[in-house]
């Protein structure tokens, strides 16, 4: 029998099978593909649209002249009663959209039709302890696999074509308060992950696993005094034990790297932000409490810390430091500097030399900051307003009647929900501006006595969040990293809680809790288009090319930390509708 004929039949059968599964032309994703994803308009291969996290697309078919014509192509419901917050950024590979959803679910959807190809639901145990809703922010791809973390602190690798589990690894003990909700990233064939749980006295860690087997390659604790791991053996200690932590406080130090990382191929460094130290009551832990509320630069092959920038030393306000550090080239005073930027929860927009972590600028990006006057760029340290630190409960005698025992309350701005929280900003290579989703709110905050207990909240503080202004909380701001000046701003009644996308079409996209996906002129901030999705948009928009046409997609579904922790703010927006769906938009075809 003719072997060429047989091989041809086999190829046809394979093509039909692939086409039927919605993965025509299926590609095995390489490190090179991920590194070059910015130039591949037909795919979105990583969280942040590139490893640097810039969230910028060179596509311009949809632009400031025609965006008003944008219409829905289709919408896909995540179904069931598992609605809550939908904070995910989708990925697009080979004509398939991969999107995570609340309660640790992952969907594969045909990008042309919106037809569901497969669905994976993590079997979550009783007793999970996510601090800030049952959200998931996204996945990563490599080879023929797709990866995401679950609320019971597992990392799962699935076959992209079938959704079948290839491997599953327990990252940490969920009963101690660990969970995973951020998107992993793949660097040098390794799946890099952080973890959540700082509110429960865990010890934060950043880990790298073999992308094909899931075996642990390295682990780097983010609190001083803990030993790292490399290839199954102890490597080096993080920092110096008790150098900035008193007594045994380092054993429950928090500093959870819960918001995912970025990578810069030019310096070969991974950048991860870390969360607040535990407990919130700063009087229990005098010192800088490294490496909490910081940005860390790590070697992707060993997990060694190369530099750090601590943006809130001795954090007493739960400001964290997890916000994404985005690599870019800073043009200033006739020089081009390899720089990075982050908009911190503490209200300052930081610019640093990404080769060594030297702070180059610290600019307020919200209207009111009470905890610090500014930063000394020579030392990289804040100039505190000491009277705005919540008081020590030990200074207040316990009342004879056994009443409430707490330290002096202060009004602090921003609130602990941050000048900017998890929601990622975007950087436009065209305008040279950063587009920052920010919020204007403050908080009454006080400290309380607290004792660590495994699996219990470890805060030692109470709070009430309040809006600063009657007419708005959310503000989308365009910032010049060379000067720290705000070029334009757009005010929104409800808090902004979703990510931002910038494109070469002179557009900036972001969503609002009121349900709108909106497009703005990237240079002026003029609102050019909006569409009502039926629920709050707190996900991250993406764009890509399908059959020669540009598409935009975003998840819709109100939730996240604001309704759970928002105090008086939460009361003002309790009428917002929950949901769970993926919306895809395009321009009408011309005839």
Image (spheres, rainbow, N blue to C red):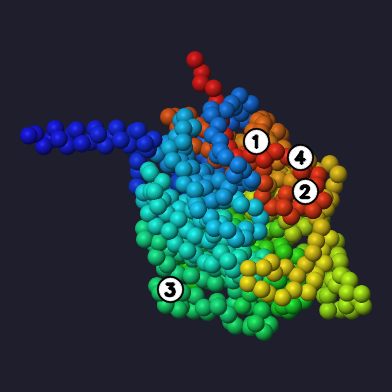
Q: Measured from the top left, where is residue 48 in percent x and y?
A: 54, 49
Label whose residue precedes the other's in the sequence (4 or 2): 2
Name the element at disc 3: strand
Q: Which residue is mark 3?
A: 230
Give the distance between the C-alpha atoms of the residues marked 2 and 3, in whole angstroms.
44 Å
Give the side of residue 167 with respect to residue 79, left or right.
left
* Circle 4 SS class: loop
Seen at 71% across and 45% down, the residue is 496
Instruction: Determine the secondary structure under disc 1.
Output: strand
Using the numbered discs, state the Cα–Cα distance from disc 1 to disc 3 in whole angstroms.
44 Å
Q: Residue furthest left?
A: 1
Circle 1: is it few (<14), some (14-19), or many (20+) Cα within 10 Å? Answer: many
Q: CA distance from mark 1 to mark 4?
A: 19 Å
Residue position for label 2: 570
Where does the image place residue 219, in percent across and percent down from the top left?
A: 48, 70
Q: Position of residue 213 (x, y in %)?
A: 36, 61
- Percent across and percent down for residue 175 are 58, 66
Q: Count up the numbered dots.
A: 4
Name the residue carrying label 1: 517
Which residue is pictured at 42% across the width and 77% down the height?
A: 233
Question: Are dots 1 and 3 in contact, CB under 8 Å?
Answer: no
**In which quadrant is the N terminus drawn?**
top left
């Amino acid at each position: 029998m003719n072997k060429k004929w047989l091989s041809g039949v086999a190829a046809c059968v394979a093509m039909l099978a692939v086409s039927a599964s919605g993965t025509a032309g299926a590609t095995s994703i390489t490190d090179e593909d991920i590194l070059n994803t910015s130039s591949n308009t037909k795919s979105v291969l990583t969280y942040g649209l590139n490893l640097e996290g810039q969230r910028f697309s060179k596509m311009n078919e949809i632009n400031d002249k025609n965006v008003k014509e944008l219409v829905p192509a289709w919408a896909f419901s995540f179904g069931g009663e598992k609605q809550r917050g939908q904070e995910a950024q989708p990925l697009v590979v080979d004509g398939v959209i991969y999107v995570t959803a609340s309660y640790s679910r992952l969907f594969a959807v045909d990008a042309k039709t919106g037809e569901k190809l497969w669905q994976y639901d993590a079997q979550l145990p009783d007793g999970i302890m996510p601090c800030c809703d049952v959200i998931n922010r996204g996945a990563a791809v490599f080879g023929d696999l797709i990866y995401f973390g679950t609320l019971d602190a597992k990392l799962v690798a699935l076959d992209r074509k079938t959704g079948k589990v290839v491997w599953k690894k327990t990252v940490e003990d969920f009963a101690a308060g660990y969970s995973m909700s951020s998107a992993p990233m793949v660097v040098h064939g390794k799946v890099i992950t952080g973890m959540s749980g700082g509110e429960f006295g865990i010890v934060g860690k950043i880990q790298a696993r073999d992308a094909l087997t899931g075996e642990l390659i390295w682990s780097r604790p983010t609190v001083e005094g803990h030993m790292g791991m490399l290839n199954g053996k102890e490597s080096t200690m993080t920092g110096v034990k008790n150098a900035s932590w008193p007594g045994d406080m380092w054993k429950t130090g928090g500093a959870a790297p819960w918001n995912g990382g970025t990578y810069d191929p030019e310096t070969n460094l991974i950048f991860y932000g870390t969360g607040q130290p535990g407990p919130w009551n700063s009087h229990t832990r005098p010192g800088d409490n490294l490496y909490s509320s910081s940005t860390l630069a790590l070697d992707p092959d060993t997990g060694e810390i190369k530099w750090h920038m601590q943006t809130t030393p001795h954090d007493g306000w739960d400001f964290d430091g997890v916000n994404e550090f985005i690599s870019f080239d800073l043009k200033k005073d006739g020089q081009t500097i390899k720089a990075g930027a982050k908009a911190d929860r503490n209200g300052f927009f930081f610019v640093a030399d990404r080769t060594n972590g030297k702070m180059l600028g610290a600019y307020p990006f919200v209207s009111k900051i009470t905890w610090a006057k500014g930063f000394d760029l020579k030392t990289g340290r804040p100039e505190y307003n000491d009277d705005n630190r919540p008081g020590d409960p030990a200074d207040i005698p316990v009342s004879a009647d056994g009443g409430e025992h707490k330290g002096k309350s202060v009004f602090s701005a921003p609130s602990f929900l941050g000048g900017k929280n998890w929601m990622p900003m975007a950087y436009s290579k065209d305008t040279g501006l950063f587009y920052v989703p920010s919020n204007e709110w403050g908080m009454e905050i006080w400290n309380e006595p607290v004792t660590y207990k495994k699996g219990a909240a470890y805060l030692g503080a109470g709070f009430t969040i309040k809006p600063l202004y009657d007419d708005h909380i959310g503000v989308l701001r365009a910032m010049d990293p060379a000067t720290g000046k705000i070029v334009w701003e757009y005010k929104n009644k409800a808090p902004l809680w979703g990510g931002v996308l910038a494109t070469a079409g002179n557009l900036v996209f972001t969503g609002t809790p009121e349900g709108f996906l909106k497009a703005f002129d990237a240079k002026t901030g003029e609102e050019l288009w909006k569409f009502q999705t039926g629920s709050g948009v707190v996900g991250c928009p993406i764009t890509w090319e399908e059959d020669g046409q540009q598409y935009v997609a975003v998840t819709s579904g109100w939730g996240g930390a604001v309704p759970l922790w928002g105090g008086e703010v939460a009361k003002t927006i309790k009428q917002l509708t929950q949901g769970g769906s993926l919306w895809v938009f395009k321009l009408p075809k011309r005839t």
